[in-house]
Structures are given as structure tokens and as C-alpha cells.
Amino acid sequence: MSAEAISTPEETRAACGNRSLDELVRETASDYASFIVADPEKESNHLDEKIEELLTRLDEFCAVVDIIRTDSSLALNRSLPEVHAKSQELETVFQKIDDLERFVALVKKDVVVMEEQVNTAEKDLGTMTSVKNLIMSFPLFSQKRAKNPAHKPLRKYVPPEIYRTEDYVLPAEDQEPTGEG
């Protein structure tokens, strides 16, 4: 504030036109009152609307919480036991798969042994792809071959011990029903 703005009481009275202090206060209060208009009913209605909106949101939140509780109860009381039962059923399926894998490994091992024997026999006897080899395999012609000193004596075939399907796979009437299909 500058020094010029500060006035003495005499200057203030002169500027106000010699009105009384009470008149000035009333006029100032009236001016401020016109700026501040308070309607208590309007303010009360606005406050009631906001409270109603908050109560509605609170009810919606409570409904969501109840739905979550219901879903949790459903999961714990109904779904979880069903999942557990299904996992128990799957254990038997897993066991069957493990048994099948062991069976396939056994068959694979026996097939490898048989392939080795077939390869050995083909090497010893030669493959009979030509008509000449086929004709020479008959007994009538085999005597001529026996006179050949380069001919190796044939070994007796001894079949390897392999799996028996009946030991691993039950007949259809003895199998347990799987509940599928």
C-alpha cells in the first residue's frame, strides 16, 4: 500500500459524504449479502442427492461383495470337491498311460532284437530277391550247393523270447468300463 492510500478519519468522512458509520456498515453488509445468497433448502436437497448417490454405490458394493462370497462358497463347497474327484479319476488314467509306455518300450526292445536276427539271417543266407536264389533254395538244387565247399552250414533258428500280448492286454470282456463314449 502506498502512503497516499492511507487516509485519516476526516478524509474518510468527507469521502463518504458525511454519512454515519452505521449507515456505511449496513450498506456494506447489504452489498456482501447480495453476493452471498444461501438457500438452505436448495443446499439441503443437493446434500440429500449426494447422500442418496453414495448410499446407492454402497448398496452396489455390498451386492458385489455378496456375489464374491457366494462364488467363494460355491468354489469351496462344490467346485473344489469336483476338481478333486476328477483329479482322482485322472490318476487311474495316468497309471494306464505309464503302463502303456512301459509296454511300448518292451515291444520296441523285442522288435529291435527281431530286426537284428532278420539282418543276421539276411546276411548269412542272402536275400532271395532273384529268381535264381529262389530256385536254388529248393532241395533238388540244394545238393549242388552242398558240394560247393564255400557254402556255410546253416544255423538252426532259435526264436527269441518275446512278450505275450495276453500277459499285458486284457480281453475286451475282462476290461473295466472307462465311462467314456
Image: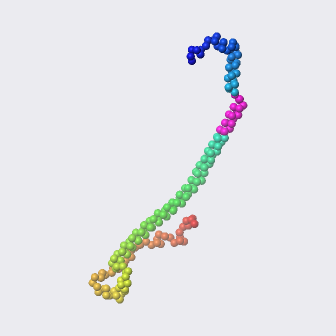
User: Residue 170 location in percent, x, y?
Assistant: 50, 70
User: Residue 29 location in percent, x, y?
Assistant: 68, 20
Q: Is residue 160 above or below residue 133?
A: above
User: Residue 103 location in percent, x, y?
Assistant: 45, 67
Q: Is residue 10 left or right of residue 133?
A: right
Q: Is residue 48 left or right of residue 112?
A: right
Residue drawn at x 41%, y 71% as measured from the top left: 111
Residue drawn at x 56%, y 56% as measured from the top left: 83
Tell whether position 40 is magenta.
Answer: yes
**Residue 134 location, quadrant:** bottom left
User: Residue 18 location in percent, x, y?
Assistant: 69, 12
Q: Quadrant of the N terminus?
A: top right
**Residue 85 location, quadrant:** bottom right
Q: Is residue 17 left or right of residue 143?
A: right
Tell whether position 179 is magenta.
Answer: no
Q: Is residue 29 left or right of residue 124?
A: right
Report the span colored magenta: 38-55
Residue drawn at x 36%, y 73% as measured from the top left: 116
